[in-house]
Image (cartoon, helix red, strand yellow):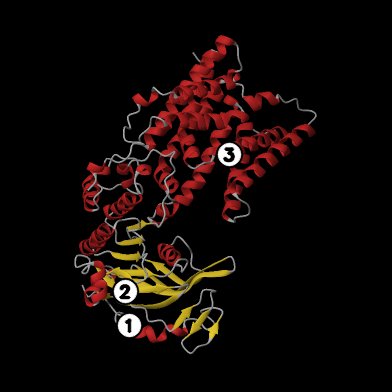
Amino acid sequence: MLKHSMPLVSLDNAGIYREGRWLVRGVSLTVQPGEIVTLIGPNGSGKSTTAKMALGLLKSDMGTCTLRPDLVVSYVPQKVSIDWTMPLSVRRFMRLTGSVGKADVAQAMDLTGVDHLADVEVRNLSGGEFQRVLLARAIARKPDFMVLDEPVQGVDFTGEIALYDLIQRIRDELNCGVLLISHDLHVVMAATDRVICLNGHVCCSGTPTAVAEHAEYKALFGARAAPTLAVYQHRHDHTHLPDGRVRHADGTVTDHCHPDDGHHHEEMEDDQDRGDPHAR
Amino acid sequence: MLDDFFMRALLAGVGVALITGPLGCFIVWRRLAYFGDTLSHAALLGVALALLFEVNITLAVFAISATVSLALLLMLRRRTLPGDTLLGLLAHSTLAVGLVVLAFMTWVRVDLMGFLFGDILAVTRFDVAVIWIGGGAVLVALIAIWKPLFAGTVNQDLAVAEGLPYERANIAFMLLMSAVIAISMKIVGVLLITAMLLIPAATARRFATGPEQMAVFAAVIGAASVVAGLFGSLQWDTPSGPSIVVAAMGLFALSIVPFAGFIRPNARSGQPLDKGARK
């Protein structure tokens, strides 16, 4: 019982400081079992850094970051380059970090549509195929916690919809927590329980609304995609200017977001799902 | 059987090749060719210090190589300088210090050539025992750390995030490399150890379809090079260490001639994806 009430990972006011600047700071977030949390934000906003912090790959320079021990973790990094000197077939790659049952491998590869590529060398895959293989590998491990860093990059649009559906299905089946980084600032998976918008810090967070409720998005994506995608409307009380300065709601401009840490997302606290989003 | 110097040389050389092959695969995959060079250059400092303090040469070489590799790891982590600069710096400064120390010891007559090119025909029974027991231990250790080391070689973040002890495996790998340099120095010499790490692995890459297979192939190809090199050396009265490397080189050359393509089992590499097979 206790195990289920404990978050898989919880970041409390965490941040990473490198070479004289904060890559990301003051991030607080939790991922519960069965919950999908999506990180969005512009390039260089600290999405991948936050994910690495959550995984324990980077040690937080402020606050705390706690990953529940003894979890089966699956990670799909943003970039994986396989050295061409390495003879590595997809089949072998599937059990890279642990022994996975043959049936699980076959099933995961079937789900992501790469079952015909088992004997191909990983370096000969196309970008989209490799992305599917990475996801298959993550799924085959039957994780408690999945961190997916732009898992659908390079995948065509219909494929993207299918993979989002798949991620949701896996979440439902395994009741695993998912920390997903989206490459799109506005469109996220509909199954997302909470969206966190980063730009060096948490700019805002909340729940997305279904694409189906927005006629213009629905027209844009088509009826097939509508149930899978959702729109996240940003409600910022400040704007990041191109030169890195920040204009606040009252019109003042400061050099950084954080002259007094985090004051500007207090009014976001009324967001719907601060409590237990998944009463499973 | 062990009374014959040639038999001892064969046993010693094959023993060394069986470990340099698999370790060499990691050197190739991780683009660490200069790391092997650095460690073997540092080995000469180990020799000098062993003579100075009158301790066992193999142990001293291991100690110095291990120190240098751990120092390298530390400096890489602190991002003092880029990797290749650090390697060059450590390689040549340890080599230079080693030579200076040797020059100071006017009372010691050192056969520098022996250390640079190896003296496989002079191996003793004890050397053979050290190679097979030490080499066996290195192989067992390599198998033990294989999974985290290989996964981390493919992608470090992935391995660590999914709970594999990559850091420890990497340190262990550095120590194994040092051990291999120490026990194989006598066989091919400081200057040519890197060749025994690289060439069999490079040859194996042509035929292997999996990482484990490549490691086994590299060991076998290395052993074949030793046998061929030693017999060639006996036949034509050439220096044994370089002859082994020339034999390894010959096998590599054979592997890249066009007809090798026919025996390569991996039909799918390089050819464009068949559109019909796509979903």
Residue on which the image places disc 2? A194
Q: Residue at image x 41%, y 51%?
A: A80
| Whether residue B241 is situated above or below residue A202 in the rendered picture | above
Q: Is residue B33 left or right of residue A48?
A: right
Percent of width and height locating residue B246: 55, 21
Looking at the rendered structure, whether the residues under marks 2 and 3 are on a common chain is answered as: no
Dot label at residue B34: 3
Percent of width and height locating residue B160: 42, 54
Looking at the rendered structure, whether the residues under marks 3 and 1 are on a common chain is answered as: no
| Whether residue A259 is situated above or below residue A196 in the rendered picture | below
| Disc 3, SS | helix
**Disc 3 to disc 1, how far (Cα)?**
55 Å
Amino acid found under the numbered disc labelled 2: Arg
Q: CB of mark 2 within 8 Å of CB of mark 1?
A: yes
Tag 1, which chain? Answer: A
Q: Residue at image x 56%, y 11%?
A: B234
Residue on which the image places disc 1? A271
Q: Nearer the viewer, residue B108 or B19?
A: B19
| Disc 2, SS | strand
Tag 2, which chain? Answer: A
Tag 3, which chain? Answer: B
Percent of width and height locating residue A190: 25, 70
Amino acid found under the numbered disc labelled 1: Asp
